[in-house]
Image (cartoon, grey):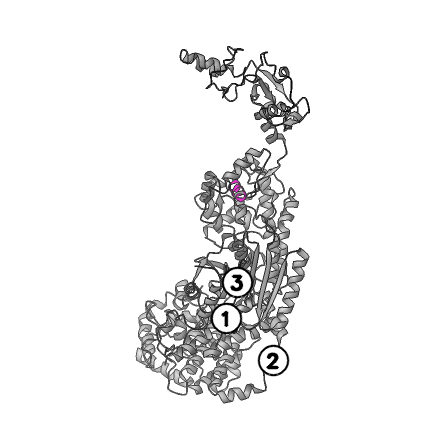
Amino acid sequence: MQMIPGDPFSISSSMGGFVHQEQHLHHLQQHIQDINPNSNPNPNAKPNSSSAKKKRNQPGTPDPDADVIALSPTTLMATNRFVCEICNKGFQRDQNLQLHRRGHNLPWKLKQRSNKEVIKKKVYICPIKTCVHHDSARALGDLTGIKKHYSRKHGEKKFKCEKCSKKYAVQSDWKAHAKTCGTREYKCDCGTLFSRKDSFITHRAFCDALTEEGARMSSLSNNSAISTTTMTTNLNFGNDSHVMNNPNLPHGFVHRGVHHPDINAAISQFGLGFGNDLTGMHPQGLSEMVQMTSSGNHHLFPLSSSSVLPDFSGHHHNQQFQIPTSSTNPNFTFSSSSISQQTSASLPSLQQQHQTPKDSSFSPLFSSSCETKQNKPLSPMSATALLQKAAQMGSTRSNSTTAPSIFAGPTMTSSSSAASHPPPRSSSPMMIQQQLNNNFNTIVPRDTHNLAPPTTSSVENNYRFQSNRSSTNPVQQMGLTRDFLGVSNEHHPHQTAHRPFLPQELARFAPSSG
Amino acid sequence: MVVAMLQEDNGTSSVASSPLQVFSTMSLTRPALLSSPSSPFKDLKPEERGLYLIHLLLTCANHVASGSLQNANAALEQLSLLSSPDGDTMQRVAAYFTEALANRILKSWPGLYKALNATQRKTNNVSEEVHVRRLFFDMFPILKVSYLLTNRAILEAMEGEKMVHVIDLDASEPAQWLALIQDFNSRPEGPPHLRITGVHHHKEVLDQMAHILTEEAEKLDIPFQFNPVVSSLESLNIDQLGVKTGEALAVSSVLQLHNFLASDEDILRKNGYSLSGDSASSLPLPNSGRISRFLNAMWSLSPKIMVVTEQDSDHNGSTLMERLLESLYTYAALFDCLEAKVPRTCQDRSKVEKMFFGEEIKNIIACEGSERRERHEKLEKWSQRIDLAGFGNVPLSYFAMLQGRRLLQGYGFDGYMIKEESGCAVICWQDRPLYSVSAWRCRK
């Protein structure tokens, strides 16, 4: 940095000049002087030592010999601190002021700046008493530095990033952010984007687990309750409140491309946050969820409650149960049944905000319905179950026992429907076959067998007509194999009655199932 | 009373015919049934009755397919005795299938069929149609989920767009676009200049839609325009859609594309392809015919996103039996949904069953050729077709799937599930896939 004659700061940079002079002789000394440059302030600066720089103190160690100055907030926030004494015009830079002063046609003497006296080095402290930098030991050596600090910490954030709506008080911070915002992103398989590697890794570890849980969990309104409480309790992760300010964001999720970094922060927060904010977790709720996760329930993923939840996959759940349940938010009791009743008192407005866009978008779609909320499980009476049963009866072995009474077996005429005896093994296949034929014929006047297929088709369905054109083949099959199976029948007494449908059987006849 | 089934051991699964088929071959005792039809049925337990109904349906279909009408008649008689549109699920399903099978037989005497239906003209009752459609929308989450996913896909595709044009190939439900308008309104960059073009064959429907949507847009102060196009989809002229340059285009097709497959069969037949029998049905249909023409036309508009909702079942088999078997499962599932949610006495439920599903069943079973418009196919086949027409799949976003699942949860539609299948959503009932939603973009 050039030493400009008349530069009021040239004295303070005399260190550099001095150092430079001594450089080739006293390397060590120079080094020491770098650290403690107050040793020999040399008022007679050598303007020609061109490579002299203002040596910076080590961070955190202000010059002990310097004046400690606390400027007022107004001064700190002032943008134009160089003021022309003639016309009181303010400038941000001293050079600009000088240029301006030239225009005033000053007499020669007043052109010079009187700077013969030693100008002591100044360090600055923050005027705010509660601030860390209020202490002279933590003073900052640079005026610009203290101004920036003041704005950042105690000032209003006036600059906002367009992409991610992050706010800044200092313009240079904002510009610096804007350059990197959105440029480097990590993307999880689930589609969430992250700007930070650590939060990305954390999320990824929990991501699959997060998607798997959440089965019986809550409806819409509660998710925001849970997530907002998380956010309030989780500020130590350094996220700004801006995450909460955007009502359109579903908490913890990548909403639209524009908002990714915001949500990344939120997600990382949630992902890391499990350690600290399981406030009032009920063990019951936890165990339920563990069960649900382990059952691999893939659907029903409530939005942010899961992001709040710790990872419940099998290998993790041990440690989860150790998590302290110090209740920082008494409102927030977390059990799967009571989620729907809990609302966070702390951020009701946010919840509403979050709610209304969704509600309004849902309401026109989903206003009327005449459904009742009876939730019958797959009862044996449902048509699907009946079809499955029919298929079972048609496809599997040993259906003898609990078949409905209308279906015939060859020789049995006496036993009730509940009987589970297999047909006597003594009857020969031939006899059975005959009787089957007889039965067929009674129903069907003609001889044409049911099995005559209209066409032979090899379809992607498992369904295929074999050479079943003759009326006896399947019957024969049945007859023959019956005997074969007669032995094993006893082991499966009540097989088909209330047997839950077996996936493999279903797969046999469910063609090209999705 | 008799007991003790025949057993049938197929060993491994591959050998046999479809189990249901085999089931239908099981013998029935009670030869007495034929002689005194009324009494024995009283003491049947519902479960037994259900199984018997299935048996009868399959038997009857077999007879119908093989042309043995006498036997079919016998089966139909019993079916009509046992089934009922007001009974339990299986009875209802059977009732509509019975009717469909009867219709099919009748159609083999075209003169008779026409004569019967001459005075019974199907009035073009618009409001009834609209009402039934609305009932379907209310009682099932399917359309709701579809609209949700469609809107989300559109929103995501239209990020940053200032001029958005949405084409709705079946503009019958304003709720979908109301939601979209509101979503656009609350996006951070503000709403775009929005145009919606609705295609429908009834003018009144479009008028109403226009009214509702315009009102909403005015309320929210969004620049909006609704263009009605009164036309059936088959006779749609692409120019009528009014696509302008410089605007981002989205197309939404809800349960419409399968109609286009209807005419293909005729064309193929003319060209000497035989569709019945063999492996023709398992190959992807050659991309000739109306469907490919339509898809190509859509492609030529270069939409930024096209969202397709279709049934995800194979009801387009070439033989009656195939279709019957498949559709039995599908409609059993759908009727089960209703049973689980709506009381049996609910009139609206009967309406939906009869006029919405009943008509579909009738079409699938009784009609052939260009008359059979309900040609539902599996998602896989649709994906192939659409891909061939020059579209690339846009996987539905994580958030969209999430919202879909939340919706199912939040509205108490238990038993339903949304599965993901190569980027597309499949709405299932108890593991049975019913409908699929997929998003596509124009691939140049």
Who is closer to the viewer here, A116 or B57? Answer: A116
Whichever of labels 1 and 2 marks the residue nearer the N terminus, that label is 2
Q: Nearer the viewer, residue A225 or A105?
A: A105
**Callout 3: helix, strand or loop?**
strand
Gap between marks 1 and 2 measured at Cα: 26 Å
> Of the residues tagged 1 and 3, which is closer to the observer?
3
Q: Which residue is disc 2 drawn over?
A: B123
Q: Is residue B272 left or right of residue A187?
A: left
Q: In front: mark 1 or mark 2? A: 2
Percent of width and height locating residue B120: 59, 84
Q: Chain of mark 3?
A: B
Q: Nearer the viewer, residue A505 or A152?
A: A152
Indicate which disc, 1 or 3, sits on the residue closer to the N terminus: 3
Residue at 40 percent of width and 79 percent of height: B269
Q: Residues within 10 Å of mark 3 (few under 14, many from 20)?
A: many
Q: What chain letter is assigned to the residue under label 1?
A: B
Task: Name which residue type carries label 1.
Answer: Tyr
Place residue B273 in its image quadrant.
bottom left
Is A268 contained in the magenta span?
A: yes
In space, the residues marked 1 and 3 are separated at their CA atoms by: 28 Å
Tell me the residue at 50%/89% (across/down): B111
Does A140 appear in magenta? no
* Residue type for callout 3: Val
Q: Quadrant of residue A105?
A: top right
Q: Which residue is mark 1?
A: B331
